[in-house]
Image (tube, helix red, strand yellow):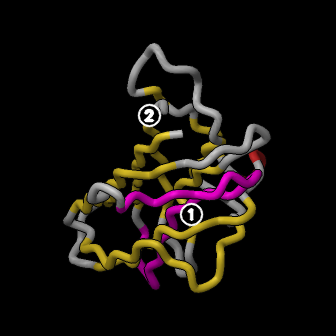
Amino acid sequence: MARYSASGSQNLASSAITALTIASQSTVHRNIIYDIVIANVGAPADLVTLHTIARITAASTEAAGTTVTPTALDIADRAAQSKVLENCGTEPTYTANQELLEVPLNHRATFRWVAAPGGEIITPATDKFGIGAKAIHASAVTEWRVGCMWEE
């Protein structure tokens, strides 16, 4: 299996807004997410934002976000088959009540999740299914960033 990395940014809003999606596209395959990093990249403040990693069943369209080209961790591997978007203006369709990871994070902190062996997040081999990273804060105006590493 080939391994990849990608990251995305988004500005916080008073409703949940997505910074990064990784989804299968026409060549359906499973993604195995094993590393996630979340941090505030705007002006630091003593505020807490709720970050959520959840399954998506319909990715945002390219017009609704910025396409990110995943980086192969081994340059001999093929290009990624996943569709990766950042800064989503239109939210993807999230699976209701299926949060995979929820992190209340102080803006001065960085959070890293690394899967224990066998504890990776695995997406189904279904077109446009994958994961999304979203965050919400009632009043903060700052930019946050999320990075993921996965196998496909």
- Give the mark toward the camera: 1 or 2: 2
Is disc 2 surrounded by few (<14), some (14 to 19) or many (20+) residues within 10 Å?
A: many
Residue denoted by label 1 = 18
Examine the rendered structure and indicate whether residue 96 appears above or below residue 145.
below
- Is 136 within the magenta? yes
* Residue 42: % across, % down: 33, 57
**Residue at the image point whose x is 58% and y is 85% from the top:** 97
* Residue 66: % across, % down: 64, 43
Q: Is residue 114 visible?
A: no
Is 130 left or right of 4, judged from the image as shown?
A: right
Which image quarter: residue 45?
bottom left
Residue stretch rendered in magenta on the structure: 119-141
Residue denoted by label 2 = 3
* Residue 122: % across, % down: 51, 57
Q: Which mark is residue 80?
A: none
Give, as a three-letter code, the residue at label 2: Arg
Q: Is residue 91 visible?
A: yes
**Residue at the image point whose x is 44% and y is 52% from the top:** 33
